[in-house]
């Protein structure tokens, strides 16, 4: 059965190759090839899943060794895959949600002349992500890791003719590379410490080395995770990544990419468990990011950017949980899966709204859309209820568990982390209610606004191509788009309950991640109660601001915090001043130094020995050849002289 | 006597050069085809060498040895080890692509032009360079090596000075002046390096009494040839200086951007992907092989210079406005990695460095040849003159991106394997240097992606709007290189199998063992 593992990756990889090399001949069918191969991978995943379920909980790890990749003395990197409960969970999420997004894109990208290439990139994205979660050693994981970075680069910058898209793509790749640096240093540290970077040998020898080494490795892994999962301080690429077509956002935010960091931490649990300082750093990063993302999400008027803030925040929850150790690993992954459902659904819903609204993204120009897009409204609404943690829906179960686990960490840390998570829940309820109200309720603010102001062009340039600048006529999207939304909505509603009742998910994942209960200072019911209070408060404030009174079509100036949040809490301003400007000055002065100083000194030194500069001038006047001849003459003389010396 | 395969592999392009030059002026196209056929036949010979080479066998294989200048102890001695055989194969592989990519680079400017554009000469010179480079990789006699190491400067000089890009922003007059400046700078730097090396070669002869690499290395290993510490260090420095100019290592690098900027893209590939490799190759073979103690003595300084090269080259690449200069500085950064890998003196570092030489040849060729196609369409080397090319020429843009991704060592492509090996091999012995060098991977992403963004994305500039996509000849050049980059990224084993034994021998030359991991987990 393990021989099937490679096929999981091979199917979408083949799709990517065929679609990207195949050329225009495949334009007519390319999108179906891509969707089918993605679905094929999902089916193989289901077969393997059934196979795993048929085994004992203790023997659900399958290893497939393909070939020796980099064999160099003392250094052994193999192409070996590991399928266990953790990677299986990811495989199903990636291929399942990924296939739905493929299907949705068939409709969404219908009018794009480069649709074939889009599907090629989507397939590449899936293949890279599958490689990442199936690799049995860190170096192979690194290949998938950067492959995901490449695919996101290609997809975020898919509309390359827009400078903003090209810039956003480059930024995403660069910020990710900073994280990648962490991963490569972590691998090098593992190699010097353990002589290996394969999961088995590393995890089984964690006890044989010092805590300092392990902390260093774990912190480098955290740096890597921060890049891929858009955690503070490497979060700045995520908001800009909205430049990509909306299905890409769904893919990046739900099934792939940003979940990779959480995977890395949970997979490396053995290392983190032995490095408490690093774990503390993980929880701090998670807690800061969950608040950071939530605050940014409150201030954005662009529906996709509001959702992007939300993703950052939700991934923050997962990272926080992953930092808690065995108390939190299972819940980090459970929230990751349920989030995969509702966030994909929300993004696809947002895309559907934009599709019906001439690709408008500004929620201040929405309003009252529930009448015109009933399916989108209902599916989006269910996703909304799930993400805020409405009792009984997916987010309720998974987020509640994380908040409980945070308190269960104990001590002052537990109170702080738990408090942050609770506060985050309130803010989540606020900003998501705000999105919901501004989009589907209230006045129809899109009426009498026929043309878009040229200063604020839409993120989706397709509209410009289609020449749709007339007053929007909101309409429901075609079936090929709404069906994936409905499926995801079902997952958003029932996923959490299905996983939690009887602790199904816990029992499934426990053999890989381990689990401990911790001892919480507050009871589970108290936590649930407090979460509910937070939820109600958040919703109420949003209702008071955006439901009871009309939403102004132009954003009010807002408080200092609001203005900062609109600018992503000044992260880009900071990066610009410190890194971009500083870097520009550095490279410019180095170019000058190289041209005058280094070149000059070396030439000058040489001139000091042989009067070269004078000759250079002569040469430039046309004596080059004679000069070359004379040089060789000199060399020949030298040889002759030594020959003579030898004779004497 | 067995068939002199190594001699023939070098003699064929040498004879081909003469024959190509002798083709009458009117039969220009015939000369091109002749050169291409010769280069392909040389490739076939190189593959034969590769197949006949037994990685598990003696250190030097397919050896040939003849007395040459008996009085002087100079012998005609050839032989290849795993490192040499890999580089001979790389050279022979790249030359056909270089010829094909430069197919029209030496055509007369316009028909009936009075100006002499020696088409035949262009291709003859390329073959001449090939012959000498191959012989440098094969020579196991120090003096013989020196001759070819120096002699290749002559054809290179004429290739740089005689053939530039078609159009030039400052007009043909300025272009020609700048070209000869670049050519002379190239020549002078390398000649000065070569002359210092010559002194060291003679010094070595005075000490050792012969020029045979194997004999001297053997005598040194067995202790029958004693060398005073200071003598060894001086000789080492003499050799190393020449190789550091050629490689080139900071701060001796400034000739490279000039030379690559002014020459046509195929010649630039010849410089950086082929000729410069002789420098790094010779560090491994001669510096480490002949002067192990001095090599270890100089290691700290060389590693720091290599580290400076890596970061300095990358930072300067970020600041360039000229595409070819950008690639030149990127190469300086990459040579820093190669030299760092050699002098880290670990198996991973040296295997990585050797692999890096091969992979850098492929990746630079892929990127730079596409750059050449791009420049030939627009007639400008300035980044600012491009924009939105991917919209009008998507295949060109795609191949450009893959070449760029190889240059930034994306995992899955060949350069990643070698770069990571170099980093890890350095890290095990010198953690601080290894970590700082890792910054290079971020900077590489910066210069590649900024270049791609400025030239290929954004709105289509009017001057590029009529740009044709890649032609069949151009695709034939690029596609195999890309295929190789992917293949060796996924399955580098064929190369590592050849290289590993040679690296093991080099490691024993310098009496170095790999640092042991703290925990013997793998065992």
Image: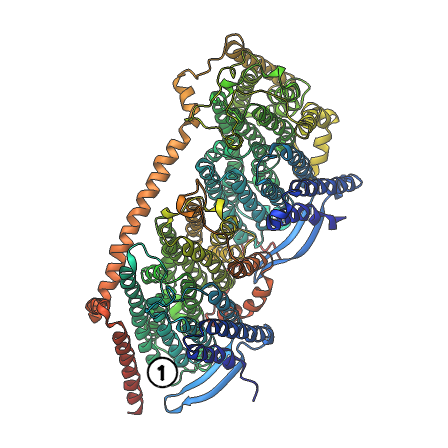
Sort mark 1 into few (<14), some (14-19) or many (20+) by Cα contacts within 10 Å: many
View extreme (top): residue: A548
> For residue A59, what is the image quadrant?
top right
View extreme (right): residue: A54
Name the spot of residue A618 as percent of width and height, x first: 20, 69
Numbered disc 1: what chain? B
Secondary structure beneath label 1 = helix
Give the total of numbered labels: 1
Name the spot of residue B334 as percent of width and height, x first: 43, 57
* Above or below, comparing residue B138 to residue A565 in the picture: below
Name the spot of residue A378 as percent of width and height, x first: 66, 19
Q: Is residue A137 visible?
A: no
Q: Quadrant of the C terminus of chain A?
A: bottom left
Name the spot of residue B75 as percent of width and height, x first: 43, 86
A83 displayed left or right of A112: right
* Above or below, comparing residue A287 to residue A603 in the picture: above
B16 displayed left or right of A631: right
A128 displayed left or right of B201: right
Q: Is residue B439 visible?
A: yes
Residue placed under numbered mark 1 in the picture: B205
Color theme of the render: rainbow
Q: Residue at x 35, y 82 (%)?
A: B207
* Above or below, comparing residue B46 to residue A543 in the picture: below
């Amino acid at each position: 059965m393990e021989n099937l593992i490679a096929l999981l990756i091979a199917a979408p990889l083949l799709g990517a190759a065929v679609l990207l090399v195949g050329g225009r001949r495949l334009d007519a069918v390319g999108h179906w090839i891509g969707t089918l191969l993605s679905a094929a991978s999902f089916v193989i995943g289901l077969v393997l899943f059934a196979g795993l379920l048929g085994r004992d909980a203790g023997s659900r790890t399958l290893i497939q060794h393909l070939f020796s990749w980099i064999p160099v003395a003392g250094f052994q990197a193999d192409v070996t895959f590991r399928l266990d409960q953790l990677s299986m969970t990811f495989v199903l999420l990636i291929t399942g949600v990924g296939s739905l997004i493929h299907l949705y894109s068939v409709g969404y990208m219908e009018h794009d002349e480069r649709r074939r290439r889009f599907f090629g990139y989507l397939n590449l994205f899936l293949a890279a992500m599958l490689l990442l979660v199936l690799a049995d050693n860190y170096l192979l994981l690194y290949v998938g890791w950067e492959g995901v970075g490449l695919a996101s680069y290609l997809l975020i910058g898919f509309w390359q003719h827009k400078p903003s898209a090209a810039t956003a793509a480059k930024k995403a790749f660069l910020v990710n590379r900073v994280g990648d640096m962490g991963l490569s240093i972590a691998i090098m540290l593992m190699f010097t410490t353990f002589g290996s970077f394969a999961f088995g040998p590393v995890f089984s020898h964690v006890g044989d080395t010092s805590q300092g080494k392990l902390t260093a490795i774990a912190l480098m892994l955290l740096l890597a995770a921060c890049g891929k999962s858009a955690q503070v301080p490497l979060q700045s690429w995520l908001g800009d990544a909205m430049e990509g077509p909306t299905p890409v956002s769904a893919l990046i935010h739900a099934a792939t990419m940003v979940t990779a960091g959480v995977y890395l931490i949970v997979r490396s649990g053995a290392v983190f468990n032995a490095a408490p300082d690093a774990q503390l750093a993980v929880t701090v990063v998670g807690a800061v990011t969950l608040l950071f993302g939530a605050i940014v999400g409150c201030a954005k008027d662009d529906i996709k950017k509001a959702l992007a803030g939300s993703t950052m925040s939700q991934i923050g929850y997962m990272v926080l949980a992953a930092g808690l150790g065995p108390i939190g690993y299972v819940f980090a992954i459970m929230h990751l899966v349920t989030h995969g459902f509702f966030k994909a659904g929300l993004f696809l819903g947002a895309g559907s709204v934009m599709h019906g609204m001439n690709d408008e993204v500004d929620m201040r120009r929405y309003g009252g859309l529930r009448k015109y897009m009933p399916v989108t409204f209902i599916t989006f609404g269910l996703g909304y209820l799930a993400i805020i943690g409405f009792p009984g829906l997916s987010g309720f179960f998974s987020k509640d568990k994380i908040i409980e686990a945070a308190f269960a960490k104990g001590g002052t840390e537990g109170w702080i982390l738990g408090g942050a998570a609770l506060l985050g829940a309130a803010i989540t309820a606020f900003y998501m209610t705000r999105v919901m109200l501004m989009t589907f309720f209230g006045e129809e603010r899109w009426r009498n606004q026929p043309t878009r102001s040229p200063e604020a062009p839409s993120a989706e340039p397709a509209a410009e191509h289609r020449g749709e600048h007339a007053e929007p006529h909101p309409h429901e999207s075609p079936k090929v788009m709404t069906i994936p939304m409905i499926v995801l909505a079902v997952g958003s509603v029932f996923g959490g309950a299905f996983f939690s009742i009887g602790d199904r998910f816990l029992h499934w994942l426990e053999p890989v991640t381990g689990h401990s209960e911790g001892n919480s200072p507050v009871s589970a019911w108290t936590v649930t109660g407090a979460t509910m209070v937070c939820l109600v408060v958040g919703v109420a404030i949003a209702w008071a601001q955006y439901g009871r009174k009309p939403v102004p079509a132009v954003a009010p100036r807002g408080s200092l915090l609001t203005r900062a949040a609109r600018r992503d809490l000044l992260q880009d301003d900071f990066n610009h001043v410190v890194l971009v400007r500083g870097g520009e000055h550095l490279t410019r002065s180095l170019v000058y130094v190289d041209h005058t100083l280094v070149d000059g000194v070396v030439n000058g030194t040489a001139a000091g020995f042989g009067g070269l500069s004078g000759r250079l001038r002569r040469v430039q006047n046309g004596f080059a050849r004679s000069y070359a001849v004379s040089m060789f003459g000199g060399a020949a003389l030298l040889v002759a002289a030594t020959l003579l010396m030898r004779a004497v | 006597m067995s068939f002199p395969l190594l001699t023939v592999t070098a003699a064929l392009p040498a004879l081909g050069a003469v024959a190509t030059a002798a083709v009458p002026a009117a039969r220009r196209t015939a000369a091109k085809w002749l050169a291409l056929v010769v280069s392909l036949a040389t490739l076939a010979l190189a593959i034969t060498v590769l197949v006949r080479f037994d990685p598990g066998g003696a250190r030097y294989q397919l050896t040939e040895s003849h007395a040459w200048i008996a009085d002087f102890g100079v012998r005609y001695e050839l032989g290849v080890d795993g490192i040499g055989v890999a580089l001979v194969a790389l050279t022979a592989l790249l030359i056909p692509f270089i010829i094909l990519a430069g197919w029209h680079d030496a055509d007369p400017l316009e028909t009936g032009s009075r100006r002499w554009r020696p088409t035949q000469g262009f291709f003859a010179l390329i073959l001449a360079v090939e012959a000498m480079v191959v012989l440098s990789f094969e020579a196991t006699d120090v003096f013989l090596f020196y001759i070819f190491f120096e002699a290749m400067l002559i054809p290179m000089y004429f290739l740089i000075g005689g053939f530039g890009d078609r159009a030039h922003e400052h007009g043909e007059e300025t272009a020609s002046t700048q070209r000869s400046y670049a050519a002379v700078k190239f020549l002078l730097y390398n000649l000065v390096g070569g002359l210092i090396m010559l002194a060291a070669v003679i010094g070595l002869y005075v000490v050792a009494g012969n020029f045979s690499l194997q004999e001297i290395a053997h005598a040194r290993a067995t202790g029958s040839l004693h060398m005073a510490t200071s003598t060894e260090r001086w000789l080492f420095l003499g050799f190393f200086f020449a190789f550091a100019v050629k490689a080139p290592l900071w701060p001796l690098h400034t000739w490279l951007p000039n030379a690559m900027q002014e020459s046509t893209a195929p010649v630039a590939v010849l410089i950086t992907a082929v000729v410069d490799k002789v420098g790094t190759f010779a560090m491994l073979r001669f510096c480490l092989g002949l002067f192990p103690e001095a090599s270890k003595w100089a290691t700290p300084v060389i590693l720091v210079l290599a580290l400076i090269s890596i970061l300095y080259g990358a930072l300067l690449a970020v600041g360039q406005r000229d595409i070819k200069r950008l690639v030149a500085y990127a190469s300086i950064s990459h040579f820093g990695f190669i030299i760092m890998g050699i002098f880290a003196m670990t198996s991973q570092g040296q295997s990585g460095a050797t692999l890096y030489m091969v992979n850098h040849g492929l990746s630079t060729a892929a990127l730079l040849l596409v750059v050449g196609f791009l420049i030939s369409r627009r007639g400008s080397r300035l980044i600012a003159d491009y924009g939105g090319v991917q919209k009008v020429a998507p295949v060109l843009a795609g191949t450009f991106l893959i070449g760029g991704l190889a240059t930034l060592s994306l995992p899955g492509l060949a350069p990643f394997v070698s770069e990571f090996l170099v980093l890890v091999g350095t890290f095990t012995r010198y953690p601080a240097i290894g970590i700082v060098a890792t910054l290079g991977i971020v900077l590489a992403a910066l210069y590649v992606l900024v270049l791609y963004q400025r030239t290929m994305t954004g709105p289509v500039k009017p001057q590029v709007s009529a740009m044709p996509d890649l032609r069949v000849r151009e695709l034939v050049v690029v596609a195999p290189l890309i295929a190789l980059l992917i293949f060796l990224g996924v399955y580098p084993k064929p190369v590592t199998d050849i290289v590993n034994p040679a690296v093991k021998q080099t490691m024993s030359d310098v009496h170095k063992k790999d640092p042991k991991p703290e925990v013997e987990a793998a065992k």
